[in-house]
């Protein structure tokens, strides 16, 4: 009896060494990752959610600070409108965080994918994944440089918590250098189109890299490169302007996702998954069309943007609509570019679209002194806006009566065209900042064109210098 | 390190094998008689106390006494009466220091174990029985009673040095066959001091009176992997007996421990049935890890994971495993507090260990106990809120001050609903238990069934029910092998209410509800606010389905083999399986017209453990006592959670997700971890004066980094029994005095949120459109290991004044090093923070005093127990990202800003204790603007987050508990008071009731709101209180909402009556007790909210003492009956 008993205890004694070897089933341990092409592919997809998160903040924060929108009631966005952003503002901190989280993921890909055997991948897959990583990293650094100026340049992933996480800021020039270099890499590695339209619009492409290069070079005031890259995009058969009032409005609705004008369109799904929720900020609490979700009306369009449109401009109703509530409540103007359906379907956010690139080329050419070529570009956008044939001379062409009345030269006309065409797409504030027009238009100092480095970051990384004025 | 473990393993194996090879040499239990002659014993007394003792040799001839009866800690007289007590002898003090022993006629046939034998005992003694002595032995009979004459059923009678014995029957009678060589009877009964009686040749009938334990010096104390006696204990252990808590109407044993053990802080989070209780042993030892102790039930470490850790029950109420234990099954609870006691639990001992021992059967006829109590609970306090007209005035003023047009829907009405009265109700509760215990010479059993039913004090479906069953069974398989099983099963169903920080808290909804709204429409349907400004609380209480079902099975099977006398091998295999099924359904009505939503989640945790111990107590000599324990343990635990949520717009009839039209958030979480340990303990005592003990445990855990997988946890303790020193001989009033000290190392490996905290991991769910994405979610930290606590303890145990007063004082210092801190990383790292890194330090130090007194002994008796605990907590080190700036390591965390209040924020800061509230300092209301003025701490001209300061702390300065028990004849009365002093409460309930910025109702303070004509210290009412650039509002977190939460509470008062034996005998009962009891009858506090004790303590470690519309503890009135038969 006691022998059996003793042997039983022995049995347990021997088996216990296995107890310490546990492998997670719920998550993937680093050692088990980066084994298959699918791992690399999933990691590439995994970068985009950081752009999704950003896409909510960038139109809101930048537009709240512009002359297009005014903050009615939002604790987090109000400081942008007042140009007095506290160093601990939540939006600034999460904007910084989202960009660097994405940069970390891109760096992770750039570190691991080259070491993976080529034979794991189908032809072109490995280079394309690398191209996506370069594109995403450049896209995110461009976000950062627009908001903060020069930022810390992290190009390799951190692997252990024991690393030295302090890192200083690089200059604006160095930041741009990295962006340009990444985009050149991306341009060479990425395909023109993907098998699926949704990927051609929603993920990185050669055209997307070139479009971003055009915008980046414009920011750097390298106008010839900006013009050239914009031209590559114009030449690309994947992209064309949509025409007509219906098609134009459709571009910003849930039914018109991934149209021909989208160069890089951030994909969203529904209220319960992958939502940006911009409707909540922009839509009034009642009096919206049937099937559209009412919001909490925290950010409203200004009279400036409402009055900017000429009669007949098909863009006006898309940018600013009027609510039709039941009396005694009164109608209010609201931003109409991001309506969510009551069913929960969420529209996309078009981060880069052809109209933007055409105006980038117009501005670049204008700065190069090629006024006529610039005017041609501008007119293309003008004609589309009034539902005119794109190639025929029109009464809306620059300089028209309105331009003359307002005293617009070609430079101001392009600026104003961007204001209207890209209203509430997060472009206006930075357009004014990079052209040095923010003082004249918004009445703010140069210091106020940049956001503060988040307090949390400065507290955690003593090598980080705060922006002037904060 | 690994090699060492293999060596150790080999060594242990060899040891076990050798022990087994020593096969058949089974030593029969030789009867080493430690009896000595009475004459010799009296001579020893004579010599020791330098007194004269006179006797005729004839009188004491042939009489033997156990040598253990002599106790030099007592007086000479006590020793003499103890020695001669069992015999027909008496003594007389003839002059100072001189005694005469002589035969006592009155005691001729009566033997009593009590030193204070009442002379009247002779009268009640039964007549002598016929003696039927045989050559093999003869029969003894007797009766066991209390000092008061109450018959004791189930008292154990054993012949010392053998396994033979019996127990008393319903009439307290026993009958036992003894052999000629048998010398002494051992009589024991739980709660009474054991008695030894010499078997006399002259008599066969004994009356034994047992004394109820007061000093408890000889109590058996359960310690890790063994037992000790209170007398010889040199570590810090608090004991609570099952009898003290069995009839307390609480759902968890944690709550039952409140105020009964020094050094244990217990806060009842709320009055919600089944809610988790906050419990800390000697303070908070961890910032991000688990702070609750390790629970070990009959040797099985319980699953300690609250289900909420895995995302269930986001309302802040957690399912606690300790609710699964039936308090009626508990024989004793031991709280291991210092490192000397807890080091044997190694990497899990740092928060203290609670050992729960369940009842065992006693040999003898089966004993039945049936007990039931039933009663009513009610929340009687009401907050003073605005009435219908005052509400309308407030809203109108808010609108005017904000420059907004009057709201056409806010008007005076005749309706004036008292929403608090509408949701609170009288709630019945019932508890019923049946147990059967007993055994034969070779087996013992304890079987019980329990049912607990508690209705919530909030109207509607709030209701908790629990069913328990237990079987404890032991048997001697052979003379040397004992096998046992302990198994308990629990099933409970809790229909819950949202509580903490939920937008669907019934109580919060009732407080803010517009009193102009009726509860019901004219047609009987629930009234629904047309603007959906708030949800009808009565509707919510009746319609929101939120059910947690728990099924739990805990048990073990063990074998204990006596290899040779004093050497035992014990193997046990234990398991703990808990399944929590949560489901929630919010109908269209609850969702204010939006589609119905719901979720279901099944959470399962399973743990197995195998432990093998070898214990050896060699027989040395009278002065040297030695014992060893060597053990090995392996355990593995796994958790799994499967969940699904969804929505439906079709029907409310089907409330399961299978009827849902849209499903989302499917989850299938799985995780496992393992622990392999070796441990040992050696204890040595010399001359009953010097005691020393050493413990070493080594733990290997799969949870931690490859570099730090194994840890060593040693402890050493020493004690000095001063009362046994020669110089104490003349200090007569001291019965026992012991000084003890210990130092040791323990660890904490729980509560990191994942079983793989050291690994760099990639997780799914980073999807884009329809494409599935994966991303890195954590950085690796191969150095991550347990938090390690160095604890030292200095204690004094003292019993004096004829054992009337016992005092235990402990002072301790607990330094937690390698504190796991979730270091906030710069976002540039790509991560927000680490899973955890061992980088901080915090200290708990404190003082505990426990005093038990027998104030009055005799027919009327009064005894008291007082305990008092002070703990000081301080974070002493956290990584500073800016050299020299302690605030650079600040970690702040906020709870949601429910109902337009500001977010209650707490902070971990170096130099400060945990539980610190963090916010602005207000300087009062600007008489010109009516706005709150905040202090610009850093003088930068702006009020920003940088101006926040620490506003107070939720930890009490001290806590105390006092119990008083009185008894007279059959009556007993006890009351229990608990006090907490110096704890602050952040009154978030008041913060939103005085916010005055929305359509919510306010409290009476708002009547004193500012106006230009009437400037006050309450800010002005202002609809949408202006969101300034820096988003500071009039209601922001400031010292305005921090209140003193000190309180004294009469937790329990009970009046009981034991029915006279004459009555119970007629009803064929051995005893019966009826009692009335009241809970929370009186509360003294200056706190303005419902209940300073009820706080959202369980949400996060950082956030203590925040009262957000917590369901307060009710007053409870109970009547109970307990019968034994």
Image (spheres, rainbow, N blue to C red):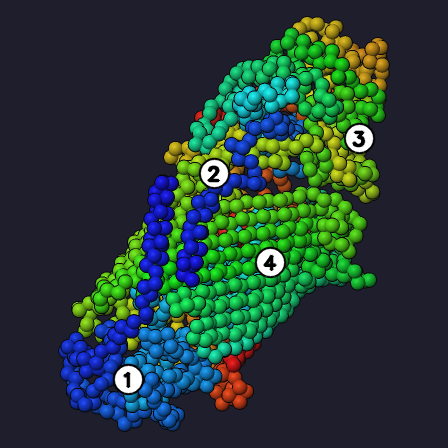
Reading the image, the residue beneath label 3 is A255
Reading the image, the residue beneath label 1 is B85
Q: CA distance from mark 4 to mark 1?
A: 55 Å
Q: CA distance from mark 2 to mark 4?
A: 31 Å
Residue at 15% of width from left, 77% of height from top?
B47
Q: Nearer the viewer, residue A401 or A241?
A: A241
> Mark 3 packing: few (<14 Cα in 10 Å), some, or many (20+)?
few
Residue B184 seen in this snapshot: yes
Describe residue B320's horizontal placement relative to residue A265 as left or right.
left
Task: Examine the rendered structure and indicate whether residue A433 appears above or below residue B170.
Answer: above
Task: Examine the rendered structure and indicate whether residue B370 appears above or below residue B969.
Answer: above
- What secondary structure is found at the residue carrying circle 2? loop
Q: CA distance from mark 3 to mark 1?
A: 100 Å
Mark nearer the N terminus (1 vs 2): 1
Pointers 1 and 2 in contact (CB under 8 A)?
Answer: no
Reading the image, the residue beneath label 4 is B550
> Mark 4 packing: few (<14 Cα in 10 Å), some, or many (20+)?
many
Q: Nearer the viewer, mark 4 or mark 3?
A: 4
Reading the image, the residue beneath label 2 is B758
- What secondary structure is found at the residue carrying circle 3? helix
Q: Quadrant of the N terminus of chain B?
A: top left
**Residue B1029: percent from left, percent from top:** 59, 35
């Amino acid at each position: 009896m006691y022998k059996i008993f003793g042997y039983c205890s022995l049995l347990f004694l021997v088996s216990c060494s296995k107890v310490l070897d546990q492998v997670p089933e719920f998550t993937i341990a680093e050692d088990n990752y980066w084994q298959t092409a699918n791992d690399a592919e999933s990691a590439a997809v995994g970068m985009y959610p950081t752009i999704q998160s950003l896409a909510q903040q960038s139109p809101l924060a930048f537009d709240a600070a512009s002359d297009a929108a005014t903050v009615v009631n939002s604790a987090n966005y109000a400081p942008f409108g007042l140009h007095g952003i506290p160093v601990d503002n939540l939006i600034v901190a999460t904007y910084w965080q989202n960009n660097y989280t994405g940069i970390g993921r891109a760096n992770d890909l750039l570190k691991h994918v080259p070491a993976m055997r080529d034979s794991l991948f189908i032809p072109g897959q490995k280079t394309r994944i690398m191209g996506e990583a370069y594109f995403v990293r450049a896209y995110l650094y461009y976000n950062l440089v627009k908001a903060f100026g020069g930022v810390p340049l992290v190009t390799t992933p951190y692997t252990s918590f024991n690393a030295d996480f302090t890192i200083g800021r690089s200059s604006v020039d160095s930041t741009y250098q990295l962006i340009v270099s990444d985009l050149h890499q991306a341009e060479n590695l990425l395909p023109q189109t993907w098998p699926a339209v949704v990927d051609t619009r929603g993920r990185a492409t050669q055209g997307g890299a070139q479009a971003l290069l055009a915008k980046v070079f414009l920011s750097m005031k390298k106008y010839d490169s900006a013009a050239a890259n914009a031209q590559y995009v114009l030449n690309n058969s994947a992209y064309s302007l949509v025409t007509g009032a219906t098609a134009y409005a459709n571009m910003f609705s849930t039914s018109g996702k991934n149209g021909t004008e989208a160069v890089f369109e951030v994909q969203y799904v529904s209220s319960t998954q992958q939502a940006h929720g911009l409707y909540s900020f922009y839509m009034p609490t009642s009096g919206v069309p049937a099937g559209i979700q009412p919001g909490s009306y925290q950010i409203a369009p200004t009279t400036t943007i409402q009055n900017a449109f000429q009669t007949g401009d098909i863009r006006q109703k898309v940018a600013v609509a009027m609510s039709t509530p039941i009396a005694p409540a009164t109608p209010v103007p609201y931003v109409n570019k991001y309506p969510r359906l009551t069913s929960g379907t969420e529209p996309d956010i078009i981060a880069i679209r052809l109209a933007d690139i055409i105006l980038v080329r117009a501005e670049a050419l204008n700065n190069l002194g090629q006024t006529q070529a610039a005017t041609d570009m501008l007119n293309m956008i003008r004609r589309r806006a009034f539902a005119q044939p794109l190639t025929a001379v029109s009464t809306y062409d620059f300089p028209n009566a309105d331009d003359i009345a307002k005293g617009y030269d070609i430079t101001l006309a392009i600026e104003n065209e961007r204001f209207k065409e890209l209203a509430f797409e997060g472009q206006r504030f930075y357009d004014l900042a990079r052209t040095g027009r923010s003082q004249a238009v918004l009445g703010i100092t140069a210091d106020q064109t940049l956001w503060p480095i988040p307090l949390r970051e400065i507290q955690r990384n003593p090598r980080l210098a705060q922006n002037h004025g904060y | 390190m690994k090699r060492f473990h293999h060596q150790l393993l080999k060594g242990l194996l060899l040891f076990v094998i050798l022990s087994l090879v020593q096969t058949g040499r089974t030593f029969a239990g030789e009867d080493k008689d430690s009896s000595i002659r009475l004459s010799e014993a009296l001579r020893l007394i004579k010599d020791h106390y330098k007194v004269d003792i006179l006797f005729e040799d004839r009188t004491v001839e042939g009489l033997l006494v156990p040598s253990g009866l002599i106790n030099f800690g007592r007086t000479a007289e006590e020793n003499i009466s103890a020695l001669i007590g069992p015999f027909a002898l008496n003594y007389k003090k003839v002059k100072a220091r001189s005694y005469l022993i002589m035969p006592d006629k009155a005691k001729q046939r009566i033997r009593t174990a009590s030193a204070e034998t009442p002379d009247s005992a002779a009268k009640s003694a039964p007549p002598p029985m016929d003696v039927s002595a045989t050559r093999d032995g003869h029969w003894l009979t007797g009766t066991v009673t209390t000092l008061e004459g109450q018959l004791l059923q189930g008292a154990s009678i054993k012949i010392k040095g053998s396994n033979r014995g019996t127990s008393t029957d319903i009439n307290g009678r026993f009958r036992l066959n003894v052999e000629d060589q048998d010398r002494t009877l051992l009589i024991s009964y739980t709660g009474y001091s054991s008695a030894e009686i010499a078997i006399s040749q002259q008599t066969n009938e004994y009356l034994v009176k047992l004394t109820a334990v007061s000093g408890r010096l000889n109590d058996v104390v359960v310690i890790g992997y063994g037992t000790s006696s209170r007398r010889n204990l040199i570590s810090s252990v608090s004991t609570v007996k099952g009898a003290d808590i069995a009839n307390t109407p609480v759902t968890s044993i944690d709550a039952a421990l409140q105020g009964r053990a020094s050094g244990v802080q217990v806060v009842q989070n709320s009055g919600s049935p089944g809610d988790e209780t906050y419990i800390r042993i000697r303070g908070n030892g961890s910032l991000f890890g688990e702070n609750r102790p390790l629970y070990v039930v009959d040797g099985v470490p319980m699953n300690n994971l609250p289900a909420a850790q895995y995302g269930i029950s986001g309302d802040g109420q957690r399912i606690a495993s300790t609710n699964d234990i039936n308090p009626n099954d508990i024989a004793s609870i031991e709280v291991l507090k210092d490192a000397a006691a807890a080091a044997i639990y190694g990497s899990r001992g740092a928060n203290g260990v609670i050992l729960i021992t369940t009842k065992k059967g006693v040999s003898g006829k089966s004993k039945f106990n049936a007990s039931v109590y039933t009663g009513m609970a009610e929340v009687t306090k009401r907050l003073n809120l605005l009435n219908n007209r005052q509400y309308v005035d407030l809203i109108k003023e808010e609108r005017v001050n904000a420059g907004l047009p009057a709201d056409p829907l806010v008007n005076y009405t005749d309706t004036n609903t008292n929403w608090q009265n509408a949701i609170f109700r009288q709630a019945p509760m019932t508890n019923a238990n049946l147990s059967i215990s007993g055994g034969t010479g070779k087996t013992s059993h304890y079987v019980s069934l329990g049912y607990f039913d508690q209705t919530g004090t909030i109207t509607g479906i709030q209701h908790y029910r629990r069913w328990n069953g237990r079987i404890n069974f032991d048997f001697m398989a052979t003379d040397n092998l004992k096998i046992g099983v302990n198994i308990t099963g629990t099933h409970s169903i809790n229909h819950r209410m949202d509580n903490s920080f939920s937008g669907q808290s019934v109580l919060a909804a009732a407080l803010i509800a517009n009193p102009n709204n009726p509860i019901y429409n004219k047609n009987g349907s629930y009234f629904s606010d047309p603007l959906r400004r708030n949800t009808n609380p009565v509707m919510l209480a009746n319609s929101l389905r939120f059910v947690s079902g728990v099924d739990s099975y805990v048990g073990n099977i063990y074998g204990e083999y006596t290899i040779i006398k004093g050497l035992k091998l014990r193997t046990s295999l234990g398991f703990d399986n808990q399944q929590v099924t949560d489901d929630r359904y919010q109908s269209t009505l609850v969702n204010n017209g939006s589609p119905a939503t719901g979720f279901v989640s099944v959470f399962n945790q399973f743990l197995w453990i195998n432990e093998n111990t070898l214990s050896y107590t060699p027989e040395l000599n009278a002065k040297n006592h030695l014992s060893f324990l060597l053990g090995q343990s392996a355990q593995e635990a796994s958790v799994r959670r499967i969940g699904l949520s969804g929505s439906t717009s079709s029907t409310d009839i089907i409330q399961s997700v299978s009827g849902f039209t849209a499903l989302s958030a499917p989850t299938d979480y799985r995780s496992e971890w393992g622990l392999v340990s070796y441990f040992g303990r050696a204890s040595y005592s010399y001359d009953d004066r010097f005691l020393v003990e050493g413990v070493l445990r080594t733990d290997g855990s799969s949870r931690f980094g490859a570099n730090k997988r194994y840890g060593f946890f040693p402890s050493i303790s020493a004690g000095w029994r001063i009362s046994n020193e020669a110089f104490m001989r003349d200090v007569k009033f001291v019965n026992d005095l012991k000084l003890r000290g210990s130092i040791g190392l323990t660890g904490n490996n729980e509560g990191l949120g994942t079983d793989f905290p050291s690994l760099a991991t990639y997780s799914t769910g980073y999807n884009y459109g329809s494409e599935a994405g994966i991303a890195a979610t954590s950085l690796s930290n191969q150095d991550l290991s347990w938090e390690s606590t160095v604890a030292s303890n200095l204690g004094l145990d003292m019993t004096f004044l004829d054992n009337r007063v016992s005092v235990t004082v402990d002072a301790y210092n607990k330094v937690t090093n390698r504190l796991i801190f979730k270091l906030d990383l710069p976002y540039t790292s790509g991560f927000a923070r680490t899973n955890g890194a061992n980088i901080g330090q915090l200290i708990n130090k404190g003082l505990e005093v426990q005093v038990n007194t027998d104030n009055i002994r005799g027919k009327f008796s009064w005894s008291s127990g007082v305990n008092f605990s002070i703990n000081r907590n301080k974070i002493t080190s956290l990584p500073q990202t800016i050299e020299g700036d302690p605030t650079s390591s600040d970690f702040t965390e906020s709870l949601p800003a429910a109902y337009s209040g500001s977010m209650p924020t707490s902070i971990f800061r170096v130099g400060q204790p945990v539980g610190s509230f963090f916010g602005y300092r207000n300087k009062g209301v600007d008489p010109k603007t009516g706005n709150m003025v905040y202090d610009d701490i850093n003088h930068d001209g702006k009020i920003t987050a940088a101006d926040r300061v620490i506003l107070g702390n939720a930890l009490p300065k001290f806590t105390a508990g006092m119990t008083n028990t009185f008894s007279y004849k059959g009556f007993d009365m006890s009351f229990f008071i608990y006090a907490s002093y110096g704890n602050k409460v952040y009154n978030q309930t008041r913060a939103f009731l005085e916010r005055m910025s929305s359509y919510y109702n306010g409290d009476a303070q708002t009547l004193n709101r500012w106006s230009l004509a009437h400037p006050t210290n309450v800010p002005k009412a202002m609809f949408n209180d202006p969101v300034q650039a820096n988003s500071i509002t009039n209601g922001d977190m400031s010292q305005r909402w921090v209140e003193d939460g000190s309180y004294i509470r009469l937790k329990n008062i009970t009046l009981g009556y034991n029915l006279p034996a004459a009555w119970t005998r007629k009803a064929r009962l051995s005893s019966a007790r009826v009692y009335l009891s009241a809970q929370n009858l009186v509360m003294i506090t200056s706190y303005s909210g419902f209940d300073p004790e009820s706080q959202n303590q369980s949400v996060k470690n950082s956030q203590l003492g925040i009262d957000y519309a917590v369901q307060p503890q009710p007053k409870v009135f109970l009547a109970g009956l307990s019968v034994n038969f």
